[in-house]
Amino acid sequence: MKPLLIIPPAPARWPMIERIGLERPAEWWADFKARVSEGGAGAQDAVALIAPGGEALGLACICRGGSIGVLSDIFTRPQHRGRGFARMLVGALLNWFDVTGGKTLHAAAPIDVAQRLLVPQGFEPTRRASDAADARVTLRRGSPAGQHDETGPGAAEVRAVLRGDWPALYDLLQHRPGPDPRVGLDESALGAEEFLAQLSFQQRRGTCVLLVESRAERPEALASLAVDQLGERTYAMILPHDVNSPPLRQAVERTATERGYARVEYPLQALAG
């Protein structure tokens, strides 16, 4: 049985995907529907389905921007597990990623799934926050996307975050600490996908503005500005916490002023010292 490969935008395929029975929050489904039906700005996503007779039995997807991707949401309906569908789905997506110029692919999974499904397909475990038998690990397939502990070449560009930026931001958060500076890198790297998803949901609701600073098209810092606060004060966060980015900070302050705020505070930066 050959997986069906869907390249967004593909609105006609959405009803089949929606019926698969994957348990996710309503906001995740809204975001996934937009990705499949409309496509994301700057994104090159792909969804693989096992769908005999038009009924989806399993799916997996890659969120991709440029040469970097994130493999996620590998799912098979419970009554059809143990038939090799997950391996077929991942194989189809890897083939597409490779032949279309993908270089670095990330994933996260429980250690048993990683060893059984992903390591045989060329993934290497990179981070693990616990020694528990059911611990989750992050994995990478392909060459590292770049160095994140040094400034890249060229002038800094600050702009609004696009959907196609998420894989590179995920890659950044595999090398630099995440939103809470008190959490170690291994643990924050494992939470990177959920953290970015929550930012995406907030952006969709209009409760935050997301900005990215990049050099040579490589994201080096991310800023989130809350725009749902009452009064003259609001809050922002810049990641990595230790980054020195006057252009990004100026863009945050300017955006806050445009939204009617007189003061911006950075509480997580204060925790980072």
Image (cartoon, grey):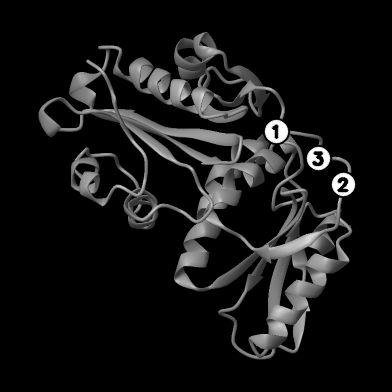
The quadrant holding residue 145 is top right
Question: How crowded is the residue under tag 3: few (<14 C-alpha within 10 Å), some, or many (20+)?
Answer: some
Secondary structure state at the residue bearing disc 3: loop
Mark 2 element type:
loop
Q: Which residue is mark 2?
A: 153
The residue beneath circle 3 is: 148
Question: Label 3 amino acid?
Answer: His
Q: Which residue is mark 1?
A: 186
Looking at the image, is mark 2 or mark 1 earlier in the sequence?
2
The residue positioned 71% from the left and 42% from the top of the image is: 172
Q: Residue at x 57, y 58 (%)?
A: 162
Q: Position of residue 107 (x, y in %)?
A: 54, 29
- Measure how far apart labels 3 and 2 are at the Cα level: 12 Å
Residue 19 horizontal/vertical position (percent): 18, 42
Q: What residue is rendered at 46% in x and 11% in y? A: 116
Cα distance between the residues tagged 2 and 1: 28 Å
- Front in this rendered view, residue 25 or 253: 253
Question: Closer to the observer: label 3 or label 2?
Answer: 2
- What amino acid is labelled 2 in the image? Pro
Report if the CB atoms under discs 1 and 3 are less than 8 Å apart: no
Residue 13, how many percent across, how many down? 23, 44
Mark 1 and mark 3 lie on one chain; the one further toward the N terminus is 3
Of circles 2 and 1, the one toward us is 2
The three-letter amino acid code for the residue at tag 1 is Asp
